[in-house]
Image: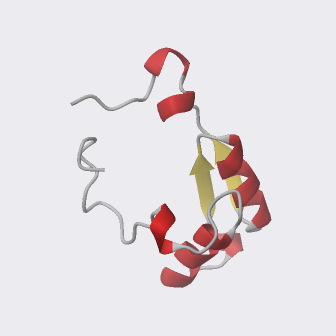
């Protein structure tokens, strides 16, 4: 987040260590929704991997795929130091 200049731009941030189960399990997404007091019908989850899409669908929210980071073609969307 810091590397991309995004630190402090989000109300919450959850990491793998914050959940008992990690993606593709929907627990991290459900934790985020609970922390923001929103339901699946108010949520759009954007992910860049198959695990993200599976987790988003399992959490019953809107889900979108974005080829970023490690899944980006030719490094598109990656942050640089």
Q: Looking at the picture, how far across and down is residue 69, in whole percent?
A: 47, 33
Above or below 33: residue 64: above
Q: Looking at the picture, how far across and down is residue 11, in whole percent?
A: 36, 71
* Residue found at the far top of this picture: 74
Which is nearer the eye, 14 or 33? 14
The quarter in which the C terminus is drawn is top left
Q: Looking at the picture, how far across and down is residue 33, in whole percent?
A: 57, 76
Q: Looking at the picture, how far across and down is residue 14, in whole percent?
A: 45, 67
Q: Residue at x 47, y 73 (%)?
A: 18
Residue 68 visible to the viewer: no
Above or below 70: residue 18: below
Which is nearer the eye, 24 or 41? 24
Q: Residue at x 56, y 83 (%)?
A: 34
Circle count:
0
Which is nearer the eye, 25 or 65? 25
Q: Residue at x 75, y 53 (%)?
A: 54
Which is nearer the eye, 27 or 53? 27
Display colour scheme:
secondary structure
- Left or right: where 12 falls relative to 55: left
Above or below 27: residue 78: above
Q: Quadrant of residue 42?
A: bottom right
Q: Residue at x 70, y 59 (%)?
A: 56
Residue 50 visible to the viewer: yes
């Amino acid at each position: 987040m810091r590397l991309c200049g995004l630190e402090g731009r989000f109300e919450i941030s959850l990491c793998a260590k914050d959940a008992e189960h990690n993606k593709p399990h929907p627990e991290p997404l459900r934790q985020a929704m609970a922390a923001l007091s929103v339901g699946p019908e108010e949520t759009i989850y954007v992910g860049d991997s198959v695990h993200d899409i599976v987790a988003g669908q399992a959490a019953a929210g809107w889900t979108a795929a974005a080829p970023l980071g490690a899944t980006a073609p030719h490094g598109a969307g990656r942050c640089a130091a």
